Amino acid sequence: MSNTIIVGAQWGDEGKGKIVDYLTEHADVVVRAQGGNNAGHTVIHDGQTYILHLVPSGILWPDKRCVIGNGVVLDPVALLGEIDKLAAQGIEVTPEKLAISDRAHLTLPYHPKLDANRESVRGGKKIGTTGRGIGPTYADKVERSGFRLADYQDPVALAEKLAAKVVEANLILDAAGVEPLDLEAVGNALNAALERLAPFTRDTAALLHREIKSGARLLFEGAQGTYLDIDHGTYPFVTSSNTTAGGACTGSGVSPRAIDHVTCVAKAYTTRVGAGPFITENQAFSDRMHGMGREFGATTGRKRRCGWFDAVLVAHACRLNGADGLAVTNLDGLDGIETIKICTGYRLRGELHDVPPARVEDWEAAEPVYEELPGWPDTPTAGAPEIGSLPTAARSYLDRLAELCETPIELVGVGPDRSETLVV
Ligand code: IMP
Ligand code: MG
């Protein structure tokens, strides 16, 4: 394996963490390039369950190096909490193993408060954010008033800038009747966190260029999914970063020319957490999943909304990301179902569409066009040891997904453990 990007083809939670963990065996450096601690990657590694938010999952391997790139937004307190939790689980996070970009923007205590405030003024049009302050942090970055890890090098300038930002945030919070922030407390917490993170802080683009030159193989671990992309997703029901493959390059400083392979990860059905359009959403299907104890969010514990596989979405995601292959996860979630539906088109105002619309109103008005395939109610795929032992109907289902998405299937997940990943 050479330099590979792993990206979600739906609304996140496709099981990227597990696929990344599986592919890490053939990688030297695992890179996060966008998003923040809104992400939640559940990885079962050597029988232990880890939930990672900011730290790349390569950390679970003793001999791999990890990078948090410039495109990530980083809550320093949350990151340190995650590092401590990993240490308690026996995983040492050292500066030799983890490098953090000096250009990464910081999520500060006012960002989650502003996130919550924004949501409350949205009334009935809430995005259902994770509440981690992601939107306001990226807003400050783009508006050019953000804080980067590198700012730690000039504590005087940092304190001045922080004072101005806290005054500004407190004006908004005060008007909303929210308790304002105490500048001194914020400053002290920030300084303490930055001091502990200083040994990890590096020019990670330069580091990655050296790694590439020395022949290291990079694995880019995407967070969220294609339809949460700020440009290509179901705007405004999206996150605030470019979750598509291009974001791996801008968010790390690695050129698109250095990328050899893109794998899109899609569930064998569809899920979404938070609000926003979801054409194939199905209540009975959701209830069935939750009844099986499946599909609860890793970051917020919320029930995920569930529905049938939407081939319009995933086919378009494969084009947006330039997918060389698809990893289809959670095939075992369809075990026991008599008849399975796949959405192959959207009907909007009497016309058939094969790409998603731009406007949320059109997403909501569109009707799914389904084709039905026989399920495999009597032969579970869960725990199948190899692709050849899947029931014929499951093989046909996968073949149809590949055909509709015009992308070959590389991997199939039939259970949460890394060993339950079948190579096609
Ligand atoms: P934010 O990223 O917290 O601003 O949330 C914006 C939207 O993205 C909400 O619908 C969240 O539920 C969703 N979201 C953010 N991160 C993830 C993720 O890692 N998996 C699934 N959904 C996510
Ligand atoms: Mg997740």
Image (cartoon, rainbow, N blue to C red):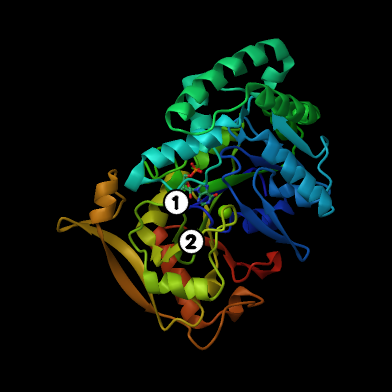
Q: Are marks 1 and 2 in contact (CB under 8 Å)?
A: no
Q: Which residue is mark 2?
A: 304
The image quarter containing residue 165 is top right
> Where residue 140 sits: x, y (%)?
51, 25
Front position among marks 1 and 2: 2
The image quarter in which residue 210 lies: top right
When the figure is inspected, residue 247 is found, relative to residue 198, above or below; the finding is below
Q: Please tell me in which quarter of the rendered image ligand 2 is found.
A: bottom right
For label 2, being within 8 Å of ligand 1 is answered yes
From the top left corner, tell me how far across and down residue 57 is, in percent: 70, 49
The residue closer to the viewer here, 363 or 67, is 363
Q: Specify whether residue 102 is in view.
A: no
x then y, percent, for residue 56 = 69, 45
Disc sitting over residue 236 in the figure: none
Between 46 and 160, the one lying in front of the other is 160
Q: Is residue 61 above or below residue 117?
A: below
